[in-house]
Image: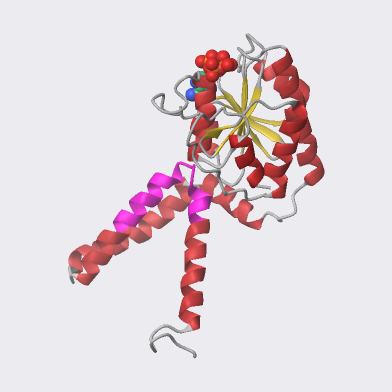
Amino acid sequence: MSTVFGLVSPRDVLDILLVTFLVYQGYLLVAGTRAVNVVRGIVVFAGVWVAALLLNLTTLSELLGRAGTVGLFALVVLFQPELRAALERVGRPRGRDLSAGVAALQAVVRSMERLAERRIGALIAIERRTPLGEYAETGVTLDAVVSVPFLEALFARNAPLHDGGVIIHGSRVVAAGCLFPLQSSDGTYRRYGTRHRAAIGLSEVTDAVVLVVSEERGSMRIALGGRLGPDLNGAELREQLRTLIYDRGSGLDTPERPASDPAAPGTPADALKEQA
Ligand SMILES: Nc1ncnc2c1ncn2[C@@H]1O[C@H](COP(=O)(O)OP(=O)(O)OP(=O)(O)O)[C@@H](O)[C@H]1O
């Protein structure tokens, strides 16, 4: 049978699936960047234009058509950095620079252990598919290799950038002193302070893996998909990070929201392990 009810052919289905896939990939490329609002504006603009065409409002549709052409060039100029980053992501080979990445993760875990031992608070977001540029812009832009001394120096008490979060992309520290969106204080995580709520908040709106060292308790935790995991030791942290960053490179599946106490041992950890 080549068609369903004689109307939809397998080719049409393939066509729709491909368009859906492309739209979704396009969404992933802009999600978390300042381009999101522009995309919304373009959708509204296109909607008005299509409506004008359908209603045969010739002057309006002609005007919007011309404005659209000019606007397209303006957008390319305005969003040149974002476009370049997006195209780089598209063209980036799937096989990453594993050795640099693995070394960076080892350094992250080791520095978290050392900070936790000394009860120095830390907040580190590891970028996955959702770009964190919007949050990096709230802090100080850096471009440094991830290393234990560097991370320790960033979070050292009285260091100029110790307040706020660090953002890591691949094996580079791209920003420090960044403001992450706070998870609202009226839910399950009410009893947590702002560092933990910033970690949960960022993990809620992006697919980043966010790590927290508690100054008060000297504990290490992972926030993912709007949930905060239990306390982890160094080996557990290393294992979970390896799974989250490398075993599931795209890692877009996020665990379900908590039904009960988020800090209950096992629950978020299980969710994190489910991603393996
Ligand atoms: N929106 C935010 N984005 C990034 N970092 C933040 C944000 N809000 C607070 N912080 C960081 O959290 C620190 C305050 O942590 P606070 O003691 O309130 O949280 P906590 O969750 O109880 O953490 P801890 O267990 O380490 O004390 C600030 O000094 C700042 O470095």
The correct choice, above or below, for 88 with respect to 190 in the image is below
Percent position (x, y) of residue 61? 24, 65
Residue 5 found in image quarter: bottom left
Instruction: Decide whether residue 29 is among the magenta residues.
Output: yes
- Residue that sits furthest to the right in the current view: 99
- Residue that sits furthest to the top in the current view: 158
Decide which of 27, 187 is in the foreground and name it.
187
Q: Which residues are magenta?
A: 26-45
State the residue at coordinates (57%, 28%). Answer: 264
Decide which of 132, 140 is in the foreground and name it.
132
Visible residue check, residue 106? yes
The correct choice, above or below, for 210 with respect to 216 in the image is below
State the residue at coordinates (53%, 30%). Answer: 262
Q: Is residue 48 left or right of residue 15?
A: left
The correct choice, above or below, for 136 with respect to 272 in the image is above
Percent position (x, y) of residue 37? 39, 45
Decide which of 222, 82 is in the foreground and name it.
222
What scheme was used to colour the molecule? Answer: secondary structure
State the residue at coordinates (52%, 41%). Answer: 206
Visible residue check, residue 146? no
Q: Is residue 82 left or right of residue 214?
A: left
Is most of the magenta stretch helix, strand or loop?
helix
Q: Is residue 133 left or right of residue 112?
A: left
Percent position (x, y) of residue 3? 45, 87
State the residue at coordinates (58%, 39%). Answer: 208
Q: What number of labels is visible? A: 0
Instruction: Decide whether residue 87 is among the magenta residues.
Output: no
The correct choice, above or below, for 78 with respect to 239 in the image is below
